Amino acid sequence: MQKYTGSCHCQAVTFEVDLELETVMECNCSICATKKFLLTFVPEENFKLLTGKDMLTEYRFNKNHVAHLFCKVCGVQSFGKGSKPDGTPVVAVNVRCLHDIALDSLTITQVDGKSF
C-alpha cells in the first residue's frame, strides 16, 4: 500500500489516498468516456480530503448511485463517492489527478459501463 497525493487543476481541492496502484479502469459510459477518466476504487477509510470540502459541488445522473464531485473553481472531477453492492462506502479516484504517476506504467482494464 502506498500513499499518493492528488488535486484538482487549481489545487483548491487536495487529497491523500492509500492504495495499490497497478491496474486502473477505463469505462465507456457517457460521463467517463467524455471526461477520459482513469479510475481506481478504494474503501472510504483509505481516502482523506485535505482541502476544499467547501469548493466541491455534486452531480448525479442515471441511477444516482455515484456522487460525482468536482471543483467549483476549475471544474475538475478528482474523485467521486459511492458504494459497493453490499453498501460498503467507496471512493472512485480519478488517477489522472494523482501527482507523480507514470500513467504508461499502469495496466488499463476496459469496462463496459455503457451497458449498465
Image (spheres, rainbow, N blue to C red):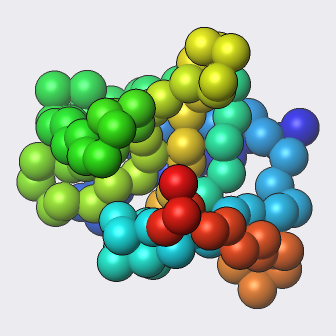
Q: Residue furthest left?
A: 73
| Image position of 11 with respect to 9: above or below | above
Instruction: Residue 66: give x, y in percent of width and height.
Output: 40, 36
Pick the front one: 111 or 37:
111
| Image position of 101 with respect to 93: above or below | below
| Image position of 3 with respect to 88: above or below | below
Q: Is residue 79 visible?
A: yes
Pick the front one: 27 or 11:
27
Q: Residue furthest front?
A: 115
Instruction: Residue 79: give x, y in percent of width and height.
Output: 44, 45
Q: Is residue 55 left or right of residue 16?
A: left
Q: Is residue 76 left or right of residue 30?
A: left
Figure quadrant of the N terminus: top right
Pick the front one: 112 or 60:
112
Q: Is residue 41 left or right of residue 30?
A: right
Q: Residue at x 24, y 41 (%)?
A: 60
Q: Residue at x 52, y 74 (%)?
A: 28
Q: Residue at x 53, y 54 (%)?
A: 116
Query: How many marks do you count on the picture?
Result: 0
Q: Is residue 98 visible?
A: no
Instruction: Residue 34: give x, y in percent of width and height.
Output: 34, 78
Q: Quadrant of residue 68?
A: top left
Q: Residue at x 68, y 15 (%)?
A: 86
